Image (cartoon, rainbow, N blue to C red):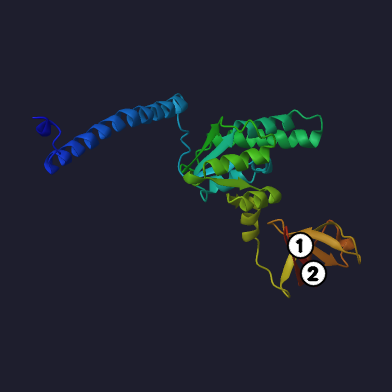
Amino acid sequence: MKSDVFAKPSEGFTQALAREIVRNLTSIGQFTVRPRQMAGRLFQRSETKGKKPLELGEHPLLVDTSVLIDGRILPIVNSGFLTGTLLVPQFVLGEVQHLADNSDSLRRAKGRRGLDVAGKLRSQKQNPFLRTKIISEDVPDVAEVDHKLIELAKRWRGQHVQLITIDFNLAQLARAQGVKVLSVVDLASALKIAIVPGEELTVAITHEGKERQQGVGYLPDGTMIVVDEAKDKVGSSVVVVVTKIHQTAAGQLFFARLK
């Protein structure tokens, strides 16, 4: 009888027992893992609860302070060449408002123009494919407005946000950090009149130059032309011949002589 009780279990019994143990361990694992998973989901929900993702709109463009002060963005928008959504952060408007309240008359005029441009952008109806949206998103731990804009652009990189500016240094800094930039200055340079040496132009001489009795005039697109021996022609229009073209960081500078 004792030999029967302590007999070696059969191979089939051993396999069945092993399967049962594995099954029980799997069930225990589910009880221990699932609560952690559920806790993680609940924690994620608690973090995002009450924070509705910002709807940036189609082709979002983050607007820099300099763009509003410059003002050229308004005719660009009205022309219909720009489409999408202009995003104007509250902190950008705050900086423009600060300029508008400045005691210096020039700064005050720039600030007021910036506020006027922002208002006209919001109410414009000539371009139905573009709208302007004021957003409250901020980067509280960053002080500089330029750096705030870059951080927002990086935050929304997955939504293909581009930064629009006329500030050369801001554009360079943003590009160095992988932010896509639209420069109004680059656009203006691309639209400059194509001129070659030997071409004749009619230029209004507006003021004196620095050397060789020079006079200085401007083409309708703002291109500067320095004219030799035209110091005494200030206030009048003259026919000139382009002699040289000098490329600068700000664009092209033309030299000419009187015909």
Q: Secondary structure at mark 2?
A: strand
Which residue is at the front of the view, 112 or 93?
93
- Judging depth in this view, the residue of 209 and 114 nearest the camera is 114
Q: Which percent across, then down, holds residue 206?
A: 82, 55
Identity of the residue drawn at 77% across and 36% down: 107
Query: Which numbered disc flags the more N-terminal residue, 1 or 2?
Result: 1
Q: Is residue 138 left or right of residue 112?
A: left
**Mark 1, other Cα within 10 Å: few <14 / some 14–19 / many ≥20:** many
Residue 184, image x and y in percent?
A: 63, 51
Observer-nearest of 35 and 172: 35
The residues bearing labels 1 and 2 have C-alpha atoms spaced at a distance of 10 Å
Amino acid at circle 1: Val
Asked if residue 190 is positioned above or below residue 181 in the image, the reply reads below
Between disc 1 and disc 2, the foreground one is 2
Horizontally, is 35 left or right of 174 in the view?
left
What label does residue 256 carry, if any? 2
Residue plotted at (69% across, 30% down):
97
Q: Amino acid type of disc 2?
A: Ala
> In the image, residue 28 lies at what x, y percent?
29, 30
Q: Which mark is residue 203?
A: 1
Can residue 65 be seen? no
**SS label for mark 1:** strand
Q: Is 253 left or right of 93, judged from the image as shown?
A: right
Residue 202 shows in this picture: yes
Residue contact between numbered discs 1 and 2, judged by CB atoms under 8 Å: yes
| Quarter of the picture holding the N terminus | top left
Residue 148 figure quarter: top right
Q: Residue at x 63, y 49 (%)?
A: 174
